[in-house]
Image (cartoon, rainbow, N blue to C red):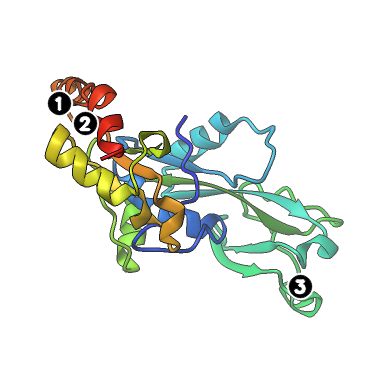
Amino acid sequence: MEVLAAEQTPDSSDWFQGTADAVRQAARHFKGFDADYFLILAGDHLYRMDFCQLIDSHIEHHADITIAAQPVSAGDATQMGIFTFDDLGKISGFEEKPAAERLTAIGGSGFTGARTSGTTADKPFVASMGIYVFNREVLLEILERHGFTCYTPYGAYYIMTDIADFGFPDDVEFARYLVKEIGVAAVPGSSFYRDAAMGRTKLRFCYCKRDETLAEADRRLAKLASVAPHHAHV
């Protein structure tokens, strides 16, 4: 399991603004993983679902996008995102937190022909649970179509590190020192924060694409044990 935490980057200084925005901002990470399907979950929920069943259903029905949903009452529907469907049971519309008057006009989400609406007289509406399964190429195509550039990270991911113990004045000077004296490149952490001071004790390293590159970086970084502390007091 890979956890993609909210982050500030040169392209966006804002934290995640909800599930959809998190997917947009994390798109560059998705492209680095060789997976056919992506399961998107909200980070502030507790789950008891068997997600294997959801993914199996997605594959069985040859869907591009599958959204988990549940029946809700008219009272609950005003606080949720509500679906409507076509005659094949596919999603034809979505309304976020519709007013009571609008719900009366809609009448309900379920009807004869829907695959598994599960609606009842007490719960006539179908609400999104914020759980999605996307085909990989469909997800990337949607994001790029709307103007989001999806980057393939070198080595698929990165590591942000704390450098406070090395004693350098800031991350930029340490990054320059690593390149010139050690032969290892890293990105100053301050470049990822709106407030540069928040990143002045951080460096970001990319994963190596080859094992031999990692081994060589390990050999070069070993020189920091004796060189860096001396340099910090010059």
In terms of secondary structure, where does tag 2 sit? loop
Q: Earlier in the sequence, mark 2 or mark 3?
A: 3
Q: Position of residue 220 (x, y in %)?
A: 17, 25
- Graded by Cα atoms within 10 Å as few (under 14), some (14 to 19) or many (20 or more), the crowding at tag 3 reads many
* Residue for badge 2: 208
| Location of residue 148 (image quadrant) | bottom left
Task: Find disc 3 in the rendering and name its residue.
Answer: 103
Packing grade of label 1 (10 A; few <14, some 14-19, many >=20) is few
Report if residue 156 is visible in the image: no
Q: Tell me if mark 2 has few (under 14), some (14-19) or many (20+) residues whose alpha carbon lies within 10 angstroms of its own.
A: some
Indicate the amino acid at tag 2. Answer: Cys
Q: Position of 217 compared to 55: left or right?
A: left
Instruction: Give the SS element for disc 1.
Output: helix
Residue type at mark 1 is Thr
The quadrant in which residue 108 appears is bottom right
Residue 48 percent location from the top left of the image? 69, 32
State whether residue 45 is above or below residue 8: above
Secondary structure at badge 3 equals helix
Determine whether 174 is above or below 18 in the image.
above
The residue to which callout 1 is attached is: 213
User: Which residue is at the front of the view, 32 or 161?
Assistant: 161
